[in-house]
Amino acid sequence: MDATQQEVLEIFTRTRALLEGHFVLRSGLHSSHYFQCAQVCQHMDAIERLAGLLAVKLQDCRFDTVLAPAMGGLVIGQELARQTKSRYIFAEKENNRLVLRRGFQFAPKERVLIVEDVVTRGGRVHECLDIVRQTGAAPVAIAMLVDRSAGCVCFDVPTVSLLQLTFPTYSADAVPASLAAIPVQKPGS
């Protein structure tokens, strides 16, 4: 683990954003670890630092707008947009799908960076990619705080993360007895 990843892990630990127990992830998978980014988002000094670290990784990427999926990507997306002096918008759920609302639009060929807090399977990021492409804009990169897949989830645009970790995940019918013995929590994304 490099120095940046160690620092990011320390921030998540210090802010109690990395939880241990028995969790059901947004994907429906079960895990003994959960990144509750809402905990780190209470601490603006931590968010400012995390966004600054992402900005360094994106220094060669040109984008006009940051798009974040609600809820998870809202705070980090906005702070990254602030630091890079970019426009910021977000997608939110409507009928269980992410959509642009509130009058948000993209111009044709507008360069869009998608920012998410934690990615396990990448479902919300894929939905954001679809939104950007359907409007004629151009997704140029994806930035995330935590890649829970440790680099296994793939997108068709450049992707950066601050922390790559993998914790075992299990389908509901394959949860080990040791994990099943712990009361399940679904803290929310």
Image (tube, rainbow, N blue to C red):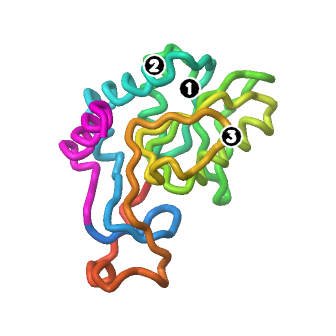
Q: Position of residue 165 (x, y in %)?
A: 38, 50
User: Quadrant of the rendered structure where residue 14 is?
Assistant: top left
**Mark number displayed over residue 156:** 3
Q: Earlier in the sequence, mark 3 or mark 2?
A: 2
| Place of residue 102 in the rendered image (x, y in percent of width and height, measured from the top left) | 64, 35
Q: Is residue 113 above or below residue 178?
A: above
Stretch in magenta:
1-20
Residue occupied by mark 2: 82
- Residue in the picture at 22% in, 49% down: 16
Q: Earlier in the sequence, mark 1 or mark 2?
A: 2
- Name the amino acid, label 1: Tyr
**Residue at 61%, 47% in the rendered image:** 154
- Answer whether labels 1 and 2 touch (C-beta < 8 Å): yes
For the C terminus, the quadrant is bottom left
Give the residue at mark 1.
88
**Circle 2: residue type:** Arg
Residue 188: x and y in percent read 41, 59
3 within the magenta span: yes
Of badges 1 and 3, the one in the foreground is 3
Residue 71: say if magenta. no
